[in-house]
Amino acid sequence: MSEIVVVEPTDGDRNRASTSGGGGGGRRSAYTTTDQRPFTRSLTLGREHVPEPFDSEKLPVTLVSEIQRFLRVANQIEIDEPRVAYLCRFHAFEVAHNLDRNSSGRGVRQFKTSLLQRLEQDEEVTIRKRKEKSDLRELRRVYREYKDYIIKHGGEYTLETREKLIKARAIASVLYEVLHTVTSAAGPQALADTDHARSEFFVPYNILPLDQGGVHQAIMQLPEIKYAIVIVGNVRGLPFSEEFKRRVPYMDLLDWLQLCFGFQKGNVTNQREHLILLLANSHIRQTHKQASKLADGNVDELMKKFFKNYTEWCKFLDRKSNIRLPYLKQEALQYKVLYIALYLLIWGEAANLRFMPECLCYIFHHMASELHGMLSGAVSLITGETVMPAYGGGFEAFLSKVISPIYEVIREEAMKNKNGTTDHSTWRNYDDLNEFFWSPDCFQIGWPMRLDHDFFCVHPPDDSKKKKSQRKVKTQEEEETINNNEDEEMGPQATVDEPPEQKWLGKTNFAEIRSFWQIFRSFDRMWSFLILSLQAMIIMACHEVESPLQVFDASVVEDVMSIFITSAVLKLIQAILDVVFTWKARCTMNSNRHRKDVLKIMWAMIWTIVLPIYYSSSRKKYTCYSSQDGSWLGEWCYSSYMVAVSCYLISNAVNMVLFLVPSVGKYIETSNTRICTVLSWWGQPKLYVGRGMQESQVSLLKYTLFWVLLLLSKLSFSYTFEIKPLIAPTRHIMTIGVKNYDWHELFPKVKSNAGAIAAIWSPIILVYFMDAQIWYSVYCSVFGGVYGILHHLGEIRTQGMLRSKFDTLPSVFNDCLLPPETKDNKGLMWLCTPGFLKGLENKKGGVLKFAIVWNQIISSFRDEDLISNREMHLMKIPISSELLSNQVRWPVFLLANKLSTALSIARDFVGKHESLLKRIRKDKYMYMAVTECYESLKYILDILVVGDIERRIIAGIVDEIEESIKNSSLLKDLKMSELPALHAKCTELIELLVEGNEDHHYEVVKKLQDIFELVTTDLLVNGSRTMDLLNIDQQLEGDTAEFFRSLEPELFASMHSIHFPLPDSGPLIEKVKRFHLLLTVKDKAMYIPSNLEARRRISFFATSLFMDMPKAPKVRNMLSFSVLTPHYMEEVKFSKKELHSSKEGVSISFYMQKIFPDEWENFLERMGSEKVDEFEDEVNEEDVRDWASFRGQTLSRTIRGMMYYRKALKLQAFLDMAEDDDILQNYEAIERADDTLSAQLDALVDMKFTHVVSCQIYGLQKSTGDPQAQDILDLMKRYPSLRVAYVEEKEEIGAGRPVYSSILLKAVNGFDQEIYRIKLPGPPGIGEGKPENQNHAIIFTRGEALQTIDMNQDNYLEEALKMRNLLQEFLRVRRRSPPTILGMREHIFTGSVSSLAWFMSYQETSFVTIGQRLLANPLRVRFHYGHPDLFDRIFHLTRGGISKASKTINLSEDVYAGFNTTLRRGFVTYHEYMQVGKGRDVGLNQISKFEAKVANGNSEQTLSRDIYRLGRRFDFFRMLSFYFTTVGFYFNSLISVIGVYVFLYGQLYLVLSGLQRALLLEAKVKNIKSLETALASQSFIQLGLLTGLPMVIEIGLERGFLNAIKDFVLMQLQLAAVFFTFSYGTKSHYYGRTILHGGAKYRPTGRKVVVFHSSFTESYRLYSRSHFVKGFELLLLLIVYDLFRRSYQSSVAYVLITYAIWFMSLTWLFAPFLFNPSGFDWGKIVDDWKDWNKWIKQQGGIGIQQDKSWQSWWIEEQAHLLHSGITSRIIELLLSLRFFLYQYGLVYHLDISGHNKNFVVYVLSWIVIVVIFLILKTVNVGKQYLSANHHLAFRLFKAFLFLGVLATIVTLSLICHLSLRDLIVCCLAFLPTGWGLILVGQTLRPKIEGTGFWHFTRVFARAYDYGMGVVLFAPLAVLAWLPIISAFQTRFLFNEAFSRRLHIQPILAAKKKHRS
């Protein structure tokens, strides 16, 4: 019970308004009781009964939605109305009993027992406290009290009344249900007496209270809402409306559709609010229309958006749209709203079908037809009856009869995926099922749908048993109605009597085949271009072409033209690949497609034959013509081959024309006319998406220029440095004949040394195909940097720049962030024009509004503890009426030290008054400081001094000084050297005034007298004329001496002379404090704020105001938007246990305090705690939890950030609406006030902004008592506008399977209240988790835009202020259409501590800034790279949503939203004037998991239809941009790694075969420059320089190039190159392995905030196959190469060529330990060694996790091979063969072989291996049979074996000259062979599993892993002995923290202390 004691007794809630359908009235006799009943016992035992709340939160899942509201209300009213509380509980019990009489639900029996006990306990006690004679009267009395209160206070706006009203409504709703039930039980008379007019204002609501009780709320008073409600409520003239109104009294259009089509009630309620808000927001922006009616234009705009996809679909399938409108305008408006509502209701209930937009079009098409038939009163030609919906309007008819059958197909197909282990081509994903509706064949399904159609067949025909069990059977009703549809879509299929045998349709249009050929197939034009260019350059190099003009020589041209033969061959390959790869989708393709594929192959084959024939026959045979005299052509010649090539190139010429005139190509692709269809038939398959994606002419020219320059650079470099230098050595190699090989040459008759040429050319060719990525990186950096400069990026980089430009901020703020005046805004001015303060003169209050906003930003910094109280005061702008006249008093931090400096200048100044004034005016802030101090002193003295004489004296002195200033005689009249003394005295006086202590009255007087004396005596050179005049006046009175005697002691000393303490006026006190700061603040304030994050945020905000952004509209006119955040099990808030638990000695709380020391101190200051070490007693634990959680990657941080949108909009709405007087009262006061304005602001913001968090398992967490559920509820209570959506899984009593529902919650009276419940057809998570989570909650979002935010993101108030500007981008028409996705930049907030986090932060920052800037413009290939992008919500909800969810293939789900948008002619932009925060992983293991997940995702993208279609449909240059910025980056990384292997194996081949010696000695081929160039290119990528250059450019732009270079050098010192090289290995491994074998999966990284030590075992598990094995292989290659390269090759050349490879191999082996905190701590090393030995020896098995046993890990590590295809297995076997090369090559180099080159030597080496295996096996068998019982015999046996082996070795060394070197070489030869055998065994596992071979493979693999572990561990153990190594590691790991003076050492010390 302790969980609910915290519930306040005044709180209330309910979950549903509808009655729960309890039992009948006949069983209610015990329900009502009179006071006649005698008491039989007293349960109170003489004590006063104190009621305890009954737990209303932990309830059985099957009952919670039905009874929770009654139990909550009972708890809330129990103290005041105990009997009514008892009746509520009794009612809850009865409802529970009626729902589950047998108590079969989980936990129901226990609940009913405990509730019954409580009822028995309360029965008699509550009767005694009853105030009426019967329960019925008691209940009716309480109900009426609440009802009267609601009616009386319904129209009030104060915050307190609003909260009480919400509570009263919730309670009254429940009491009405109980009263109705009790009344029914009491009989007909009681029923007649009760209040039948049940008020509808008790209905729970989301944003709009559409019930009667909500009409008084502010949001319902908005005119646009009223008019939208009127439109939606217009049911006049609809058929059946009278009949329906009897069932639903207050019916609107959505109710009518529900009754006609059988939609769910929750769906209707949800979409009603959705539609009203869309109509209202659309209406308010139509400012030029009359406000008295909702203009048709708004609805037309919505119609166009909602049905653009549907009308295009109809046009594509050549069908007539079923949206038919009448001619009457009023009727047409009603019809339009009906069609929109129908679509929304279909979409809202479609569940997983929302990922299939054309399937929804199909459903809408038929339902719209039925709707039109009903509206027009059409009669069916077949039945002669009025057209009615095929599925009727029964309960949940739409869900059960339309959605569920299709959902079942999706679910069963997804189950065939088997968690990503089956091949993609064996099951239909979302895209396959949706694309079936791109074909006219879809209409064969009919309406009502024929469930025996092939579409519903899930299992392929060979699976007959499953097929029979899953076959769909039509019901009798469907068979009767199947022919009643009058649509032409049914066609002849409607009359089929006997359903044909169902067959599985297979893939649709595309099959995701796992092959590297996919890259060639998708980007064939690029590969063809590169291959043909390579061929041409080799030919040119052979001809020794030096200049471009030499290419036109006849011989060169003739040879170069041979590239067209290659082109024909490549086209043939492409045509064959198209057929092979679409074979599994052949069933769904039409015959035209098949014919075209066959024709393409034939056409390509013809050219492949014709061109070589013509080429060979026409060489040197030309026909020449001489042109006319004087013609520039001169003589020109051609051959028959040239004519053939001209014919071959005709199609290319057509494509070139279409490329140059994109509008023509777009028209041809999108038009349905016959001629366009014919023209586009040959080019691409006719698909619904991917048509008309051409860019504008200007964009085309921009990205064409970019790529032409890049390709020219790339090809020039490749020709000059890679290809041309290789021709001469190649010719030399081909000429020499090698007779003597160092091994047994298998192919001795091969001419021209082909092996050597292949070894030399292969790495060059691989680098040639890869190095365009390097050139792209260079050009990206240059172009991106220039673009950033042109767009004002880095306008304000430092604090100094901010200070110098601060006075311009109000002007640019005014231009950008304040709505333009309506009168002046005749044209739409999109771009801000920076100006200065004089620009504000036309806009009254402009500076005032800036000051209000600026102060709010600074306050938010203080609330976030980024700044201290003092810094906040220094940074705020004083608010006063002066601002209305644009007289600004700048923040003190700008004026810091200016007064002291001015006084110093004046004190020592020699010269004229004008020169001094000019010098002070030169610094505007100094002049302002001096002026303000002077004015403030006058103002304060005017208030302080009240005595008449004193005031006259002060006024006179002031007049004298001002006269001196006016006469420019200040330096003559005043002694400037006395100013510092005056400054000191004034400071002392102001300090006393600030304290305001009455006891200091005398000190104040004394200070005033000191100042008076100083001024009159010392400062004024000639004394004060005022004093002289005063003396003269006194003398005239005749009593001078007496006057002076009375004056001197009493000046300022009289009690009535001064007003001290000063009046308690806010503005005055603020002014005095500010004056005090101006007098006292020194140099330090120039570095305010001291917090680096605060500085960065202010600088970026200020910079962004100078960028191009649209004008801000008023909040009321802005686009509305929602934020959607998916959440699963991630951290909501750090729990108390997590906060203080010390894993490895460091708690999160301790860690945070050391990492953010300044913010911790600011937090303690805010909490009022002075002692840092004793905060526990003074600071609330919840506040500490919040503080720490806001610095981690938690959901609470994200929600706080997103709720800044609401705060910003409320502030902006206030500035839009409030008058200047309201503004001067200060925004904080209005925010707190319970007045009408505040309510109006809330209403306006609610209409514009919603935040929905999709906490998928919130229901489960709540039912199991997970603390995270309470944390989520706390967030809802803290932010009342926050909404939480979750999926409820409930066992329905009597149902065979659980029922799933999407539920939306909000917090009401401290509880979570259910708003909407929408039943789902089944579990929603059948695809990838995150997109499915987003999809179920997207129906609860609102508005025209949707921002997708991950739960590791953050937002800031100053950025939220720019949201309405950003939303205006959706209204800017570019490229003839507005954008559909708006990209934003991100700031990585996790880069502040560890070096790895810093590297990741910079890498990510360069990608999301300079990279995406270029992608969006000019390259036009920016997509959606995760969040925080803004989506055009209506565009995406009608086109498949904001991500794709098919299992495995859509692993990187976010990027597919961008692909889908582009394919559907959307438009993605990128804007840098706004940013949000984002967290990244901070430890190497987490980073590697993330990199692996992204690489997996990219490999799956490579196989996807989206990549294929974009690669084929983009024009050539846009396709290049697309390739190099998506999968190309990963493929090039893979090529780069393969290049290293090819180079080393090539060199190994040359060395071991003896070819290298021959080349060096005979052909004199020394250092081949091309190889060095190629390896240098490879190392450029490997060392991370590819990301380094953009990084330097971006940091240079934003922080200055000196800082950029400094940071880059520092990064290298901190081993950034090691990190990037290691990361590069991760990318290439997972990308290559996933394409080959699959196995892609989501890898949770944890996103932990603290960097901990990882054990050696964990590192080995993570990196063994991806890095360690490859590192050892490279090391082995390098060692063998070094051993056998002869002395004829210099060591210097060797080092130069292989340095990068040595670096790579060592990095891959040791980086995980270098970047592991405490990786060289001796204590950790010892623990890791013990753990490693335990892990390697532990047996695996069922239930034993990978981290516990080597065997479990090993089996899991090769799981991808189990499901691999035959082709992939063959490739894996072929790759394994490389390990046998070592043995073959090395055995011929043994001394024992005696230079014998016979093949027998190699065979003998295998005999040796077999003998070794037999010996090991013998020892193993002996161990099994002898070690236990015959221990001595076993030891003797081992000794005998050892001596035998030793004797054999000695004998061989004596007889056969076996040397020590031979033994070493044997190890180098046999170790790779053993590993190769293991790989072969793993690949053949299905064949050998269960045999002895498999057991042997496992034993052998364990031995190898143990050996590799020992080799890795040894150097770590050695280095751990040296203390300096550990210190060095700590320094480079945490250097960023050291540079910020953070406390890393205490953290590490705490770890050591804990360990000790």
Image: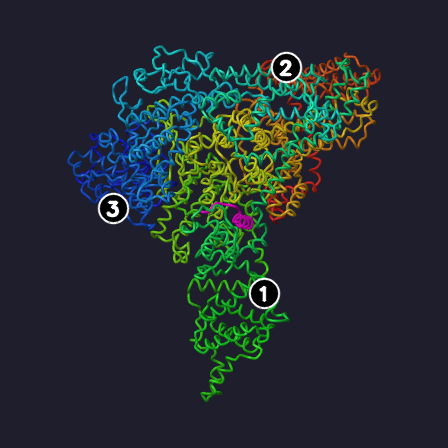
Q: Amino acid at mark 3?
A: Ile
Say whether residue 1467 is magenta.
Answer: no
Which numbered marker is on residue 954?
Answer: none
Q: Secondary structure at mark 3?
A: helix
Camera-near label (1 vs 3) is 1
* Residue 1755 shows in this picture: no
- Relative to residue 1500, is residue 1905 drawn left or right? right
Q: Nearer the viewer, residue 1287 or 1085?
A: 1085
Q: Which residues are magenta?
A: 1094-1112
Name which residue type carries label 2: Val
Q: Name the element at disc 1.
A: helix
The reply to whether discs 2 and 1 touch (Cβ–Cβ < 8 Å) is no
Q: Are marks 3 and 2 in contact (CB under 8 Å)?
A: no
Read off the residue under disc 1: 920
Where on the picture, by quarter, is residue 1693? top right
Which of the two labelled residues, at mark 2 and mark 1, occupies the earlier sequence position? Answer: 2
Name the side, left or right, on which 1301 lies relative to 149: right
Residue at the spot of label 2: 610
Disc 3: which residue: 151
Q: Is residue 1240 above or below residue 1875?
A: below
The three-letter code of the residue at mark 1 reads Ile
In this view, the residue in front, 1007 or 1605, is 1605
Compare marks 3 and 2 and give the one earlier in the sequence: 3
